[in-house]
């Protein structure tokens, strides 16, 4: 337990109106509530319910608006432990782990995240009801008056923190509005150039992250450029050791990481059987992957359609091909009836957890396994995915999910849906035209924002260490939706050796203006992260009211912030944000965000961190 919790400023007890919550049951019906909430228009309130680990509900205040959920938690005084899963994946809060044995065990216990904002979106208007968060730790920005909540889930059903939001001070109900920028469709070569220059600057790795670099290799090969850079990155991946893929003994738990990593080596034309073992020998990564196949067709110790699809794709490119039992297992995970018929989800009941990212990648896995677009399993999955596409062409309101979905649409020949997806992505890509009246520079031309809100933020304040990670993860994954080959068909063979030249942008670049004066894009908000499944917006809510727990309002909230504590990296997931609710992909992420303040679509710039 942290010092902050031991020295809580205020201690009050909820005594009435509290009902027990399914699968998030504490030792007593009424939790002990400690801490301080933000006052009216003072900041972002954070609520953490530690049941059933402890019968305590802790409240904190993050002064002012916050760049991301993770920033709000840190600013409110919570100690957060994460692992890398296409962005920070939440493992523990104040030392309380959802799963002490394996942070990534899936399905399994996790920290579910909730927002007071409409539809669980940070940009939505704050309400008096909890909604399952559709973004992860790196999602944001989060405006003043919002409330973020975390509660423990057993992995199948989740419920919000046991705090009635009407007990908190009044809030500003102004939703965040964002401007529209960008061309009708995006350029895969432009974004590949932006990504490739970062690979070159990092000696083949972006931010020293093998997981992010794997997706970057996919991106360059998809665009057909940067062959020399791909070679350099492949060499860096070979030299990265076992931190990402684990040891050979860990293969059952790390099969998905091995599959993604091996796929990047296949794309680069590198022998996957020559991976250095660190002791002077070599490892056969695809042999290890195939060895994790179980009798029922699943892989490893914790399989799901998303991870499984990567294994199918990688193995389909081998002489032995994808195992027939593995293809059958994936097909059997599809929702068979009801509103989500055709979808693939992230838990034992795909009909209640159907998710665009899981369905899109499942389509690619089924195709890699030998099915065609006319097969009933693929056709119904594509139909479900099409039904999730927004009027702007997006899936989930973010470019990660839309990139993966657009790639699946193209793979099955759904041209209209693929074109619409590319249009949404292109609208969030930086071009020379979008530099005018923004803080963006020619160096950012080609980069793709994760969401419209992210583009609006960068237009006003540029890219820096606070938001660069989000743009990197978005860009490497969004490129797949810009008319590129399917994942199973990606190859660096034939790619141009050089990267596209950086843009010069002769048009004048003026000082940034208020982005809220720009046209507003359709209000489709992101389902995140990835990075880890996004829970459906119909997630189970408690059938009776939570306690109207009295909460003290802070008068001097802390403004100190500390970096999110990150441990060993794990799977970086294409097209998925952080595990929202637990923190997936993505993210979260999803994505690492930094300092800055946001109010109703604008942020007051905090000093740059050094």
Image: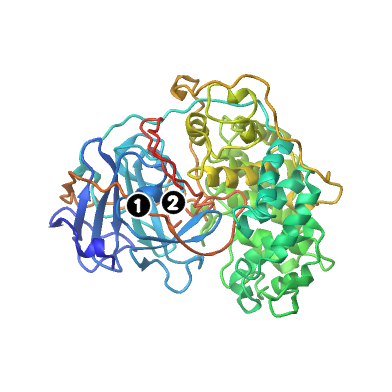
Between residue 239 and residue 409, name the one nearer to us: 239
* Camera-side residue of 419 and 260: 260
Instruction: Look at the numbered disc 1 and give the secondary structure of its residue.
Output: helix
Give the numbered dot on residue 73.
1
Distance CA(mark 1)–CA(mark 2): 9 Å
Counting from the top left corner in percent of width and height, residue 437 is at: 53, 21
Residue 182 in percent (x, y) is at 61, 26
Q: State whether residue 370 appears in this view.
A: no
Viewer-nearest residue: 364 or 53: 53
Looking at the image, is mark 1 or mark 2 earlier in the sequence?
1
Residue at 57% of width from left, 73% of height from top? 301
Q: Nearer the viewer, residue 306 or 492?
A: 492
* Image coordinates for residue 480, horizontal then vertical, percent: 69, 44
- Label 2 sits on residue: 137
- Is 87 drawn above or below residue 325 in the view shown? above
Is 153 left or right of 222, judged from the image as shown? left
- The kind of secondary structure element at disc 2 is loop
The image quadrant where one finds the N terminus is bottom left
Give the quadrant of residue 185: top right
Q: Residues within 10 Å of mark 1 (few under 14, many from 20)?
A: many
Q: Is residue 494 left or right of residue 540?
A: right
Q: Are marks 1 and 2 in contact (CB under 8 Å)?
A: yes
């Amino acid at each position: 337990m942290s010092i902050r919790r031991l020295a809580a400023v205020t201690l009050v007890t909820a005594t009435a109106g509290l009902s027990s919550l399914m699968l998030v049951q504490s030792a007593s019906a009424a939790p002990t509530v400690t801490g301080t909430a933000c006052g009216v228009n003072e900041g972002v309130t954070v609520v953490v319910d530690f049941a059933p680990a402890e019968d305590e509900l802790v409240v904190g205040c993050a002064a002012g608006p916050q760049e991301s959920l993770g920033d709000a938690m840190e600013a409110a005084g919570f100690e957060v432990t994460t692992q890398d899963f296409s962005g920070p994946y939440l493992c523990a809060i104040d030392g309380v782990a959802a799963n002490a044995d394996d942070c990534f065990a899936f399905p399994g216990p996790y920290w579910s995240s909730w927002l007071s904002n409409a539809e669980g979106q940070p940009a939505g208007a704050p309400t008096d009801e909890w909604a399952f968060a559709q973004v992860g730790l790196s999602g944001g920005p989060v405006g003043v008056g919002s409330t973020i909540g975390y509660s423990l889930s057993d992995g199948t059903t989740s419920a919000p923190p046991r705090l009635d939001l009407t007990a908190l001070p009044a809030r500003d109900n102004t939703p965040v509005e964002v401007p529209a920028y960008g061309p009708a469709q995006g350029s895969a070569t432009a974004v590949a150039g932006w990504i490739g220059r970062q690979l070159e600057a990092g000696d083949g790795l972006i931010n020293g992250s093998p997981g992010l670099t794997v997706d970057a290799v996919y991106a360059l090969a998809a665009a057909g450029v940067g062959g020399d850079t791909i070679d350099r990155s492949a060499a860096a991946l070979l030299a990265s050791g076992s931190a990402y893929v684990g040891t050979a003994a860990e293969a059952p738990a790390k099969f998905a990481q091995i599959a993604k990593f091996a796929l990047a080596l296949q794309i680069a034309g590198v022998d996957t059987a020559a991976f250095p073992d660190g002791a002077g020998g070599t490892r056969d990564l695809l042999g290890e992957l195939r060895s994790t196949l179980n009798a029922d067709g699943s892989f490893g110790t914790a399989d799901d359609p998303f991870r499984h699809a990567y294994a199918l794709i990688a193995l389909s490119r081998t002489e032995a091909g994808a195992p027939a039992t593995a293809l059958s297992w994936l097909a059997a995970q599809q929702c068979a009836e009801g509103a989500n018929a055709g979808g693939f989800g992230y838990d034992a009941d795909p009909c209640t957890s159907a998710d665009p990212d899981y369905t899109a990648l499942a389509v690619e896995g089924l195709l890699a396994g030998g099915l065609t677009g006319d097969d009933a399993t693929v056709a119904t999955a594509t139909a479900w995915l099409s039904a999730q596409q927004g009027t702007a062409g997006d899936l989930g309101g973010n470019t990660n999910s839309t990139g993966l979905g657009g790639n699946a649409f193209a793979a099955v020949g759904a041209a209209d849906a693929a074109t619409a997806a590319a249009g949404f992505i292109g609208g969030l890509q930086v071009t020379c035209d979008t530099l005018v009246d923004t803080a963006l520079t020619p160096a950012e031309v080609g980069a793709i924002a994760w969401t419209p809100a992210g583009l609006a933020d960068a237009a006003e304040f540029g890219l820096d260490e606070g938001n660069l990670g989000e743009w990197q993860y978005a860009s490497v994954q969004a490129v797949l939706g810009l008319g590129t080959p399917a994942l199973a068909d990606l190859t660096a063979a034939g790619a141009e050796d050089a990267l596209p030249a950086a843009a010069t942008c002769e048009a004048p670049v003026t000082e940034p203006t208020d982005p809220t004066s720009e046209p507003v894009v359709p209000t489709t908000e992101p389902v995140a992260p990835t990075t880890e499944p996004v829970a459906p917006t119909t997630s189970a809510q408690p059938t009776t009211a939570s306690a109207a727990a009295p909460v003290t309002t802070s008068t001097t909230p802390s403004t100190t912030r500390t970096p999110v504590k990150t441990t060993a990296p794990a799977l970086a997931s294409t097209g998925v944000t952080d595990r929202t609710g637990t923190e997936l992909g993505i993210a979260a992420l999803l994505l690492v965000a930094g300092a800055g303040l946001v109010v109703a679509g604008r942020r007051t710039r905090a000093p740059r961190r050094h």
